Amino acid sequence: MAKTKPAPTSTACVALVGNPNSGKTTLFNALTGMSQKVGNYPGVTVEKVTGTYSHQGLRYEVVDVPGLYSMRPVSLDEELAARAMAGTEGRPPDVIVFVLDASNLERNLFLFSQTLAAGLPTVVALTMTDMLARERSGIDVAALEARLGVPVVNVVAHRKQGLSELQDAVARAIVERTVPDIDLGFPTVVREAVFRLHDALARAGIDANRSEVRETLLNPESAWNRKLEGNPDIVRAFQEERQLVLGESIQGRTVDAQTRYAWAAKVRRAVLQSSDSRVRAVSDAIDRVLTHRFFGLVIFFGLMYLVFQSIYTFASPIMGWIENGIQSVQSAVSPALAGAPLLQSLVVDGVLAGIGAVVVFLPQIAILFCFIGILEGTGYLARAAFLMDRILGWCGLNGRAFIPLLSSFACAVPGIMAARVMPDSRSRMATALVAPFMSCSARLPVYVLLIGAFVEPQFGPAVAGAVLFVMHFVGLAVAVPMVWILNRSVFKTKRLPFVLELPRYQWPRWRDVALTVTTRVKVFLQTAGTIIFVMSIVIWALLSFPKSEAMDSQYQAAYQSQPDSFKEARTEENYVQAQRVRDSYLGQFGRAIEPAFVPAGFDWRITTAVLAAFPAREVVVSALGIIFSLGGDADEESSDLRSALAQAKWPDGRPLLTLASAASLMVFFALCAQCLATLATIKRETGSWKWAAFSFVSMTTLAYIAAVIVYQVGIRLV
Amino acid sequence: MSKSSKKPKFCRGMVCRVTCVTGDGDHVCRLLDLGLTPGTEFSVVKVAPLGDPVEIDVRGARLCLRRRETQGLDFEQVERSG
Ligand SMILES: Nc1nc2c(ncn2[C@@H]2O[C@H](COP(=O)(O)OP(=O)(O)O)[C@@H](O)[C@H]2O)c(=O)[nH]1
């Protein structure tokens, strides 16, 4: 065959293909080390991971194809995998390394039998043999090689065993280009029909190999059938043969699957040495405790409490250090630039604050992914999903969404990133869109400020505490119906059975955990981090311009003409700062859209503070401080800020914030997507701005509607 | 075979045999891909504390499925051990 292509570069392309959980990622990591590039297939939450290695002077590019159960593309991930193998994305791979899990032979062989249809040179990497050895079982590699017709290499990737043998085999396969062809034992009627159809196609000038013809025959929905549509004679020939082979009742797919599995079972019997089930029994015994009706749930919630506490509480001192560090850099740099106020403001409030806004997320991301790495490495993560699936399954999520959603109560950014633990892209998408509704820790200062100013003085600390508690569930209460609706409208994609595997328990490997953490931190900094940084500077600019000496002296004059009581309450500097914000582009915008927020009980000052908090939600408190002329150092415990809020008035003298408008503001904050970092992370994880925009628009709309309802009901009741 | 045929309730240790996989679409396709072809025996390894999903052992591999997602899969109980 003239399949060999002239090599323009000396890089060979290797595709790693295999079932989920077959050890593909581990092998990929061992082969490519730190040379990995993590990209994203556009518009979907599927990562495209590539890496390189060199072997005997030749460079190899390795593509980690998403794990799949079948080459017949049913889910999105599988479609992408099938596409990667067919070579519609660039050129087809030069060689396939099929990762075959020795402890799940039949199911893996089923997939193997399907990958043969691609007609590409193949090498099998046999994984998990160390686990079989522990169970006093083993695989007869020579016999397997004979049955599969391709080289089989035993690898234990995390111990670097078999890697160079695998690389040798890959190099040889590329040179020899031998394409395996094995007899799967299809029934004679099928084979004869395939033979006839193959002839018919050849006569019509269509080039197809026998497995492609068989796939077309047995699976009327396969891609080839669509290709043949323009050829009515051929279509009719296929229909006739299908009648003949399958009759009316049996389905082609059933025949296909049965044949392949029968073949797989035969191979397994020939190559697998009997095992000692006692080792598996240890894992099962652990499971009897960890998935126990009572103890299982107790241990689960204990562990989850630990995870949550770690990102919520343990991360905060580190985040405090980062904030202090940034502040001390700011105060160190600031005097040096005092001669150029604009540059000073750009560097201090724009660039340094922007860096701070990015770096501050790293402790939470690192801690969460460290836990995820450990839980995944031991196999517990799958058990957590097993335990929680019932609770999350009914509304279209699944058990694996628990950790991402829990983490989102600390911060949605690591939460959305953690949606990666879910194997299918659809539930990843749903989780990523729901996560921002969870009440993250950045919303807490707003609740504390408003509850402290409006609820506590009137109703006492007990009610205040209860309100704070309830506020944490407002988002959840809205999110659940939202997923339910999303699943029925936006994600109109087909529903597949949720498949979960509980791997045997193992000790986590620290190298893998470290790799997980560093990859995630790197990905965050490179993508979401850049967006957050840039947008922080944009918001800074909108808050700082227009700016002129003339305006400043006008503000100063205005301050001087105020009565003394006014001057006692605020310094000139703070007053000028507040006026600058009022006249900035952002302040102008806030005033322009004030009418839209009046039904929710907000005036331009609150609207502007909300807008200014877009880069990071917690900024709203200091923004309110600035706007109410108290300076940017005010925090949520500040009694000055509380009383300033309580005394603020509409132009007509009505109090600005009442119980109703405070409640409306809190509900708005609970639901709105006023968080750039979250949107940037959604963009990064879903690979498109579309979903970030969707999230922003839907959350803001919901928040607005809810705030209006709360305010309008509130003013009528109170 | 109709969908309404009675299915036994899953409990631990139960052994079942797939009798028929009906319906079309990707849902059934996936069950077949996982090796749940007619005639295959599987055993129930465990049931989650909240009743769903169920872990089964099929063709020497373990996997968890949700009860209601086994629609289209008809099976009969073969024996009950333990
Ligand atoms: N004992 C053993 N465990 C392995 C081997 N390869 C991978 N694993 C573990 O199996 C689990 C799944 O592996 P992973 O590489 O994530 O699989 P993927 O889903 O195919 O990418 C991880 O916990 C790995 O540490 C192996 O050869 N032997």
Image (cartoon, coloured by chain):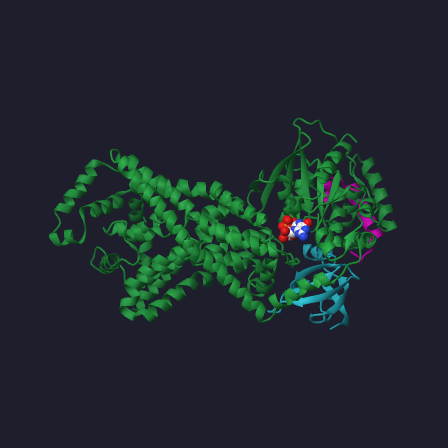
Which quadrant holds residue A458? bottom left
Q: Foreground: A546 or A166?
A: A166
Q: Which residues are magenta?
A: A224-251
Quadrant where the C terminus of chain A lies?
bottom left
Query: Does the image show residue A595?
Result: no
Picture coordinates of residue B25, whole percent (x, y) = 69, 55
Picture coordinates of residue A323, whole percent (x, y) = 36, 48
Which quadrant holds residue A576? top left
The answer to whether residue A435 is left or right of residue A510 is left
The answer to whether residue A231 is left or right of residue B47 is right
Q: Is residue A417 above or below residue A452?
A: above
Look at the image and say whether residue A137 sits in the magenta stretch.
no
Q: Colour of chain A?
A: green
Kindly report the secondary structure that dominates the magenta region of the rendered protein.
helix
Q: Is residue A401 above or below residue A540?
A: below
Query: Does the image show residue A476?
Result: yes
